[in-house]
Image (cartoon, rainbow, N blue to C red):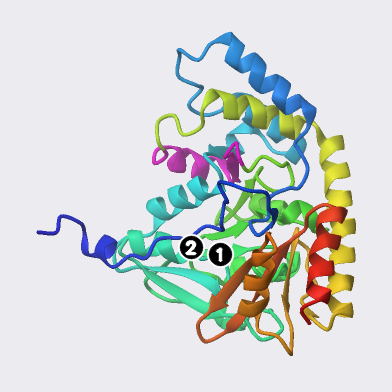
Amino acid sequence: MCYFRPEIEALIGYTPGEQPQAGKFIKLNTNESPYPPSPRVTRAIQQAAEAGLMRYPDPMGNAFRRRAAEVLGVEPDWILCGNGSDDILTIVTRSLVGRGQLLRLPYPSYVLYKTLAQIQGAWADEVRFRPDWTLPDTFAAPSSELRLAFLPNPNSPSGTVVSRDAMGELAARLPCPLLVDEAYVDFAPANCLDLVRENDRVLVSRTLSKSYALAGLRFGFLVGQPHVIAKLANVKDSYNCDALAIAGATAAIDDQDWLRENVARINATRVRLSAGLEQLGFSVVPSQANFVWCQHPARTSRELYERLKQNRVLVRYMDYPAWGDGLRISVGTDEQIEACLALLRTMV
């Protein structure tokens, strides 16, 4: 006898990138930072632990909300904290999308979006990117059952962006809320926060996993107008962020000098990675994130992925039905990237 809902029985869950448990690898497959976080983070976590963990954390993470609000130029009640930005995406989907309704997303993009729709018993309305990774006008097409649209900006796996002006036009035309997933936006020259002030149907999600080097901490947040945030807060878990995460995240976002330095060195290495791949004959999509998407005309992406893995270098092989496959390579240190390129020189 099956006790699971039909949607769960049919569900193929999200598959994260490999996290090797033994041995030494050069790990360029999950877009983590190659550098440790701000030293303030460790101190803040230690102080929070020493203060005691016997009580529940602040359910709204107000220490983070206050400091983040100062950094972002909004008020604290414009911010909702989450256990990583995946938690934020889940809260928004649960709040807005019901059985048989539509959640729109671009394709290819973050595969978790479709999983969230399936869990709700909703339909994932996938709108395919053009070959140059621009969005067709149909992304904003009306539909009576459309309840939410996700748009990662920069996108994964491509690292490409939709301009702020184009995003504003999409938001104005869509008949539903638009969540702009800015997980990688600190590596790009612009963001869409000002659209949140102009339109209460625009939401912006962020994570501290990438540019702040806190993938292991699991902390993200949402920016939206206060009346929207208040409704979403009713749906989140009671204490969805623990005390150590709140303390570490607050210390991280407080250290904007560290953030600027970290982003600058990762972006500089991204330039070197892209140039090195192009010299080896790869087709490389210009990226504004901390990874690049590439393909080689004479070698299959699967073959290159497997041979790199045999040499203990992990990159992400991604295959999108009816689109194609490729390699997504995270930006590591200069030394890690040179080691990866040196191996590829022997393969192509």
Residue 58 position within the rendered picture, expressed as x and y whole percent measured from the top left: 51, 22
Q: In the image, what residue occupies the spot 77% across and 76% down?
A: 285
Q: In the image, what residue occupies the spot 79% across and 81% down?
A: 282
Question: Can residue 108 be seen at all in this image of the molecule?
Answer: no
Q: With 105 as the anchor, is 72 left or right in this view?
A: right
Q: In the image, what residue occupies the spot 51% across and 50% down?
A: 86
The answer to if 56 sits in the magenta stretch is no
Image-quadrant location for residue 302: bottom right
Question: Can residue 340 be seen at all in this image of the molecule?
Answer: yes
Image-quadrant location for residue 280: bottom right
Give residue 51's mark. none
Q: Which residue is mark 1?
A: 110
Label 2 crowd (10 A; few <14 / some 14-19 / many >=20): many
Image height of 7 relative to 52, above or below:
below
The answer to if 219 sits in the magenta stretch is yes
Work out how far the residue at label 2 is from the one at label 1, CA to CA, in angstroms: 6 Å
Residue 306 position within the rendered picture, expressed as x and y whole percent measured from the top left: 62, 72
The secondary element bearing badge 2 is classed as helix
Task: Spot the residue most to the left.
Answer: 1
Q: Which residue is mark 2?
A: 113
- Quadrant in the picture for the N terminus: bottom left
Residues shaded magenta: 216-236
- Quadrant in the picture for the C terminus: bottom right
**264, 167: nearer the viewer:** 264
Contact (CB < 8 A) between labels 2 and 1? yes
Count numbered badges in the picture: 2
The secondary element bearing badge 1 is classed as loop
Residue 305 position within the rendered picture, expressed as x and y whole percent measured from the top left: 65, 72
Label 1 crowd (10 A; few <14 / some 14-19 / many >=20): some
Callout 2, which amino acid? Tyr
